[in-house]
Amino acid sequence: MLQLFFCCLALLFCLVKPDPDPLQDYCVADTKTPPSVFTNGVLCINPNLAFASHFKTSVLSKPGRTSGNPFGFNVTLTSTTNLPGINTLGLTMARADIAANGLVPPHSHPRASEVTICLQGNLLVGFVDTSSRLYTQQLRPGESFVFPQGLIHFLFNLDSMHSALVLSGLSSQNPGTQLTSIATFVSKPGIPDEILRKAFGINGQDVAKIRKNLGG
Ligand SMILES: *[C@@H]1O[C@H](CO)[C@@H](O)[C@H](O)[C@H]1NC(C)=O
Protein backbone atom coordinates (compact mmCIF):
# COMPACT_ATOMS: atom_id res chain seq x y z
CA MET A 1 0.00 0.00 0.00
CA LEU A 2 2.75 2.39 1.07
CA GLN A 3 4.83 1.37 -1.94
CA LEU A 4 1.92 2.10 -4.25
CA PHE A 5 1.55 5.51 -2.64
CA PHE A 6 5.21 6.39 -3.23
CA CYS A 7 5.00 5.06 -6.79
CA CYS A 8 2.03 7.35 -7.48
CA LEU A 9 3.85 10.25 -5.85
CA ALA A 10 6.99 9.65 -7.95
CA LEU A 11 4.85 9.47 -11.10
CA LEU A 12 3.10 12.69 -10.16
CA PHE A 13 6.37 14.55 -9.61
CA CYS A 14 7.66 13.37 -13.00
CA LEU A 15 4.60 14.91 -14.61
CA VAL A 16 5.07 18.28 -12.91
CA LYS A 17 6.87 20.58 -15.35
CA PRO A 18 7.45 24.31 -15.19
CA ASP A 19 6.31 25.20 -18.74
CA PRO A 20 5.25 23.04 -21.69
CA ASP A 21 8.19 21.77 -23.75
CA PRO A 22 8.73 23.42 -27.13
CA LEU A 23 7.71 21.27 -30.11
CA GLN A 24 10.31 22.98 -32.32
CA ASP A 25 13.93 24.09 -31.91
CA TYR A 26 12.62 27.55 -31.10
CA CYS A 27 9.55 29.73 -31.60
CA VAL A 28 10.84 33.29 -32.00
CA ALA A 29 8.05 35.52 -30.71
CA ASP A 30 6.12 37.54 -33.24
CA THR A 31 6.18 40.87 -31.44
CA LYS A 32 4.77 42.86 -34.37
CA THR A 33 1.31 41.38 -34.84
CA PRO A 34 -1.03 42.37 -32.03
CA PRO A 35 -2.69 39.17 -30.83
CA SER A 36 -6.29 38.55 -31.81
CA VAL A 37 -6.19 34.98 -30.54
CA PHE A 38 -4.41 34.05 -27.33
CA THR A 39 -2.16 31.03 -27.16
CA ASN A 40 -0.18 29.48 -24.33
CA GLY A 41 2.88 31.64 -25.09
CA VAL A 42 3.34 34.02 -28.02
CA LEU A 43 2.88 33.13 -31.71
CA CYS A 44 6.12 32.42 -33.61
CA ILE A 45 7.50 34.00 -36.72
CA ASN A 46 8.45 31.79 -39.67
CA PRO A 47 11.64 29.96 -38.52
CA ASN A 48 13.31 30.92 -41.83
CA LEU A 49 13.04 34.55 -40.77
CA ALA A 50 14.82 34.03 -37.44
CA PHE A 51 18.08 35.90 -36.82
CA ALA A 52 20.80 35.36 -34.26
CA SER A 53 19.87 38.77 -32.85
CA HIS A 54 16.45 37.40 -31.82
CA PHE A 55 18.35 35.36 -29.22
CA LYS A 56 20.27 38.32 -27.78
CA THR A 57 19.23 41.10 -25.44
CA SER A 58 21.03 44.01 -23.81
CA VAL A 59 18.25 44.81 -21.31
CA LEU A 60 20.16 43.28 -18.41
CA SER A 61 23.30 45.34 -19.11
CA LYS A 62 21.95 48.57 -17.66
CA PRO A 63 21.24 49.17 -13.98
CA GLY A 64 17.64 49.92 -13.01
CA ARG A 65 16.99 53.16 -11.15
CA THR A 66 16.22 52.36 -7.51
CA SER A 67 15.51 55.90 -6.26
CA GLY A 68 11.86 55.93 -7.35
CA ASN A 69 11.03 52.71 -5.52
CA PRO A 70 9.93 52.88 -1.85
CA PHE A 71 11.77 49.64 -1.00
CA GLY A 72 14.92 50.62 -2.92
CA PHE A 73 14.98 48.01 -5.66
CA ASN A 74 14.46 47.78 -9.39
CA VAL A 75 14.00 44.53 -11.31
CA THR A 76 14.63 44.24 -15.04
CA LEU A 77 13.21 41.14 -16.74
CA THR A 78 13.73 39.47 -20.07
CA SER A 79 10.50 38.85 -21.97
CA THR A 80 9.32 37.78 -25.41
CA THR A 81 9.30 41.49 -26.28
CA ASN A 82 12.94 42.27 -25.49
CA LEU A 83 14.22 38.73 -26.20
CA PRO A 84 11.86 37.16 -28.78
CA GLY A 85 13.96 33.97 -29.00
CA ILE A 86 13.06 33.01 -25.42
CA ASN A 87 9.44 32.24 -26.38
CA THR A 88 8.40 28.68 -25.32
CA LEU A 89 11.81 27.90 -23.76
CA GLY A 90 10.48 28.10 -20.19
CA LEU A 91 13.05 30.63 -19.04
CA THR A 92 13.24 34.19 -17.76
CA MET A 93 16.27 36.12 -16.60
CA ALA A 94 16.11 38.95 -14.13
CA ARG A 95 18.48 41.62 -12.95
CA ALA A 96 17.78 43.16 -9.55
CA ASP A 97 19.52 46.34 -8.49
CA ILE A 98 19.13 46.89 -4.77
CA ALA A 99 20.07 50.22 -3.15
CA ALA A 100 22.08 50.45 0.08
CA ASN A 101 19.91 48.75 2.73
CA GLY A 102 17.29 48.26 0.03
CA LEU A 103 14.87 45.35 0.10
CA VAL A 104 13.16 43.18 -2.46
CA PRO A 105 10.23 42.58 -0.09
CA PRO A 106 8.66 39.16 0.51
CA HIS A 107 7.11 37.96 -2.73
CA SER A 108 6.45 34.76 -4.66
CA HIS A 109 6.51 33.53 -8.24
CA PRO A 110 3.52 31.22 -8.74
CA ARG A 111 4.92 29.60 -11.88
CA ALA A 112 8.70 29.41 -11.35
CA SER A 113 11.59 28.38 -9.18
CA GLU A 114 14.40 30.91 -9.12
CA VAL A 115 18.15 30.61 -8.90
CA THR A 116 19.92 33.81 -8.01
CA ILE A 117 23.58 34.74 -8.11
CA CYS A 118 25.00 37.69 -6.20
CA LEU A 119 27.29 39.68 -8.50
CA GLN A 120 27.90 42.60 -6.20
CA GLY A 121 27.24 43.41 -2.55
CA ASN A 122 26.36 41.62 0.64
CA LEU A 123 22.85 40.17 0.77
CA LEU A 124 20.62 38.41 3.23
CA VAL A 125 18.27 36.18 1.25
CA GLY A 126 15.66 33.71 2.39
CA PHE A 127 12.41 31.88 1.83
CA VAL A 128 9.69 30.43 4.02
CA ASP A 129 8.40 26.93 3.28
CA THR A 130 4.80 25.72 3.63
CA SER A 131 5.42 24.69 7.24
CA SER A 132 6.47 28.32 7.93
CA ARG A 133 10.12 27.43 8.45
CA LEU A 134 12.50 30.19 7.40
CA TYR A 135 15.67 29.43 5.43
CA THR A 136 18.16 32.30 5.19
CA GLN A 137 21.70 32.71 4.00
CA GLN A 138 24.12 35.54 3.44
CA LEU A 139 25.34 35.92 -0.13
CA ARG A 140 28.63 37.41 -1.27
CA PRO A 141 29.68 38.00 -4.89
CA GLY A 142 29.78 34.71 -6.82
CA GLU A 143 27.49 32.89 -4.40
CA SER A 144 24.09 31.51 -5.40
CA PHE A 145 20.82 30.58 -3.73
CA VAL A 146 17.62 28.93 -4.96
CA PHE A 147 14.04 29.89 -4.15
CA PRO A 148 11.65 26.95 -4.67
CA GLN A 149 8.60 27.55 -6.85
CA GLY A 150 5.76 29.50 -5.28
CA LEU A 151 7.40 30.06 -1.90
CA ILE A 152 7.61 33.52 -0.34
CA HIS A 153 11.15 34.92 -0.46
CA PHE A 154 13.11 38.15 -0.05
CA LEU A 155 16.50 39.74 -0.71
CA PHE A 156 17.91 42.38 1.62
CA ASN A 157 21.03 44.45 1.01
CA LEU A 158 22.92 44.37 4.32
CA ASP A 159 25.33 47.06 3.15
CA SER A 160 24.31 50.56 4.24
CA MET A 161 26.80 52.25 1.88
CA HIS A 162 26.78 50.36 -1.43
CA SER A 163 24.16 49.01 -3.80
CA ALA A 164 23.92 45.30 -4.59
CA LEU A 165 23.37 43.48 -7.86
CA VAL A 166 21.92 40.03 -8.41
CA LEU A 167 21.11 38.07 -11.55
CA SER A 168 18.35 35.45 -11.47
CA GLY A 169 17.15 32.69 -13.71
CA LEU A 170 13.50 31.66 -13.47
CA SER A 171 12.02 28.39 -14.72
CA SER A 172 9.12 29.90 -16.64
CA GLN A 173 8.60 32.26 -19.53
CA ASN A 174 5.95 33.96 -17.38
CA PRO A 175 6.91 33.44 -13.70
CA GLY A 176 4.42 35.96 -12.29
CA THR A 177 5.25 37.98 -9.19
CA GLN A 178 3.08 38.60 -6.18
CA LEU A 179 4.43 41.00 -3.55
CA THR A 180 2.93 39.68 -0.33
CA SER A 181 2.30 43.03 1.38
CA ILE A 182 0.99 44.74 -1.74
CA ALA A 183 -1.30 41.85 -2.71
CA THR A 184 -2.74 41.80 0.80
CA PHE A 185 -3.11 45.48 1.65
CA VAL A 186 -3.35 47.37 -1.63
CA SER A 187 -5.17 45.03 -3.99
CA LYS A 188 -7.77 46.60 -6.27
CA PRO A 189 -10.44 46.53 -5.06
CA GLY A 190 -9.16 46.22 -1.51
CA ILE A 191 -9.70 43.24 0.75
CA PRO A 192 -12.38 44.37 3.27
CA ASP A 193 -10.88 46.00 6.41
CA GLU A 194 -12.62 43.52 8.67
CA ILE A 195 -10.79 40.64 7.03
CA LEU A 196 -7.38 42.32 7.38
CA ARG A 197 -8.13 43.28 11.02
CA LYS A 198 -8.99 39.68 11.85
CA ALA A 199 -6.20 38.14 9.78
CA PHE A 200 -3.46 40.27 11.33
CA GLY A 201 -4.95 40.96 14.76
CA ILE A 202 -4.84 44.72 14.19
CA ASN A 203 -7.35 47.57 14.35
CA GLY A 204 -8.84 49.75 11.61
CA GLN A 205 -6.24 52.48 12.11
CA ASP A 206 -3.45 49.97 11.64
CA VAL A 207 -5.04 48.78 8.40
CA ALA A 208 -5.35 52.37 7.15
CA LYS A 209 -1.77 53.15 8.15
CA ILE A 210 -0.30 50.08 6.43
CA ARG A 211 -2.38 50.83 3.30
CA LYS A 212 -1.06 54.40 3.28
CA ASN A 213 2.55 53.31 3.88
CA LEU A 214 2.30 50.96 0.91
CA GLY A 215 1.01 53.70 -1.36
CA GLY A 216 -2.62 52.51 -1.37
C1 LIG B 1 13.63 50.96 -13.04
O1 LIG B 1 14.70 51.46 -13.78
C2 LIG B 1 14.37 51.87 -15.11
C3 LIG B 1 15.67 52.27 -15.79
O2 LIG B 1 16.34 53.27 -15.07
C4 LIG B 1 13.36 52.99 -15.04
O3 LIG B 1 12.97 53.35 -16.35
C5 LIG B 1 12.14 52.54 -14.26
O4 LIG B 1 11.22 53.60 -14.10
C6 LIG B 1 12.57 52.02 -12.90
N1 LIG B 1 11.39 51.48 -12.21
C7 LIG B 1 10.97 51.95 -11.03
C8 LIG B 1 9.78 51.27 -10.44
O5 LIG B 1 11.52 52.87 -10.44
Image (tube, rainbow, N blue to C red):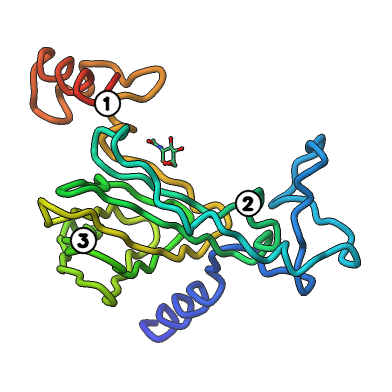
Where does the image place residue 22, in percent across and percent down from the top left? 72, 68
**Quarter of the rendering containing residue 52:** bottom right
Residue at image location 59% in from the left, 64% down from the top: 90
Q: In which quarter of the image is the C terminus?
A: top left
Give the crowd class for mark 3: few <14, some 14-19, many >=20 residues within 10 Å. Answer: many
| Residue marked by disc 1 | 185
Q: Mark 3 points at which residue?
A: 126
Earlier-in-chain disc, 1 versus 3: 3
Q: Which residue is drawn at 45% across and 50% down?
A: 76
**Mark seen at residue 82:** 2
Q: Which circle's residue, 1 or 2, is located before the other in the chain?
A: 2
Answer with left or right where residue 1 lies relative to residue 158. right
Give the amino acid type for the residue marked by disc 3 in the picture.
Gly
Q: Which mark is nearer the camera, 1 or 2?
A: 2
Relative placement, left or right, of 208 versus 169 is left
What's the residue at 31%, 41% (across, down)? 66
| Circle 1: element type | helix
Q: What residue type is labelled 2?
A: Asn
Check whether the beta carbons of the residues at disc 1 and disc 3 lie within 8 A of each other.
no
User: Any atom of ligand 1 within 8 Å of the CB at mark 2?
Assistant: no
Tell me: residue 186, above or below residue 121.
above
Q: What residue type is labelled 1?
A: Phe
Tell whether circle 3 marks a residue whose Cβ is less than 8 angstroms from ligand 1: no
**CA gap, disc 3 and disc 2:** 29 Å
Residue 30 in picture, x, y percent from top left: 79, 50
Seen in the image, is 180 located left or right of residue 40? Answer: left
Q: Tag 2: Cα neighbours inside 10 Å, few (<14), some, or many (≥20)?
A: some
Q: In which quarter of the image is ligand 1?
A: top left
The earlier-in-sequence mark between 3 and 2 is: 2
